[in-house]
Image (cartoon, helix red, strand yellow):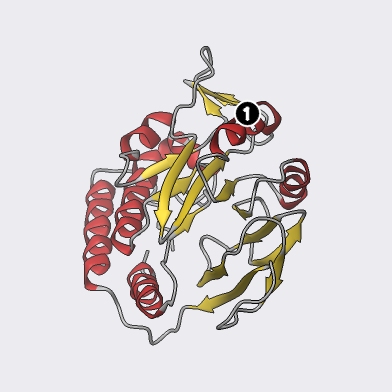
Amino acid sequence: MGGLSKKSFLVKELSRESLYPALLLSSGNMLFPRTVPPEERAAARITAEGLVQATRAMGGTVMGVGSLDLSGGLSFLQSIHHPPDFTLVSSNLVHPDSETPLFAPVVHQRVGELRVAFVGLTDHTTVAAGEGFKVLPWQQALEQRLAAVQEEADFILLLSNYPMAENQAIARKLATIDCIFQAGHVIGNVAPTRTRNALISQTDIRGKYLGVLDIAWNGRGLWAKGLTSAPEGKDSRYRHRFVSLPISAHSDPEVEAIVKQTQRRLNSLRRQGSPSCMIGK
């Protein structure tokens, strides 16, 4: 967790410098870097709680639910889901009997003058079911959800745990999706590519980069690279960059305090005889 305070300083600095209203989002798989065995869950949950606190301190309030996020158990996810302060979003992570969503299927926010809807998907091919939940295929959950959302939103952003090929299939089928941030199964950064009306991109959630996507929105349908002071034509324009975390970056005192408190909790657990303490980056 040592890099979180520097990451927070950079996030806040970029937000202050931006010419556009800024959002900090996680598409999922943020809480755990791998599947967590039962004997490591206590330490992993402490670390994940610290990550959530730090993300909130940076201004992040919305997170998609990835398959790895379920490693800490459904009850743990329910314990950190506190809308609107911190909202987990998944349209297809549902109750095993009623098939009602266990978390927010969609989150609406006004960003400047734009009505934005964040929709979440959890990859059903990685974890189809577990204690207290099951994951529906996106074909069963997404189309009906978008039909209800599109009248209330100018811009629809999908936080998807599916891999690139599946996200491209989603974009080809559902033209109302404008952007897809994926937390799939390939490690690393993926620059935006366009499929039908959607830009699809990925930032390595545990890497030393921030993915920054600036958008000048001009309506659904066409995308063009580059921002101009006076947008021309009917295209929506975008600029994307991966910003590396400088070694010499300043630290954010608020997040630094969260990191230290999390480490103290892990040290205490270790003294009690926990077999492992997993520290994220």
For mark 1, does the 10 Å Cα neighbourhood hold few (<14), some (14 to 19), or many (20 or more) residues?
Answer: few
Residue 251 in picture, x, y percent from top left: 30, 77
Q: Residue at x 76, y 50 (%)?
A: 168
Residue 14 vertical position relative to residue 47 in the rendered view, above or below: below
Tell me if I can see residue 131 in this picture: no
Residue 113 in picture, x, y percent from top left: 43, 59
Tell me if I can see residue 164 in this picture: yes
Quadrant of the image for the C terminus?
bottom left
Q: 154 or 88, which lies in front?
A: 154
Residue 181 in picture, x, y percent from top left: 59, 55
Q: Residue at x 27, y 66 (%)?
A: 255
The furthest residue to the top: 97
| Mark 1: amino acid | Gln
Q: Which residue is mark 1?
A: 144
Residue 101 vertical position relative to residue 122 in the rendered view, above or below: above
Q: Residue at x 57, y 30 (%)?
A: 92
In the drawing, does residue 235 fall left or right of residue 113? right
In the drawing, does residue 225 fall left or right of residue 211? right
The furthest residue to the front: 233
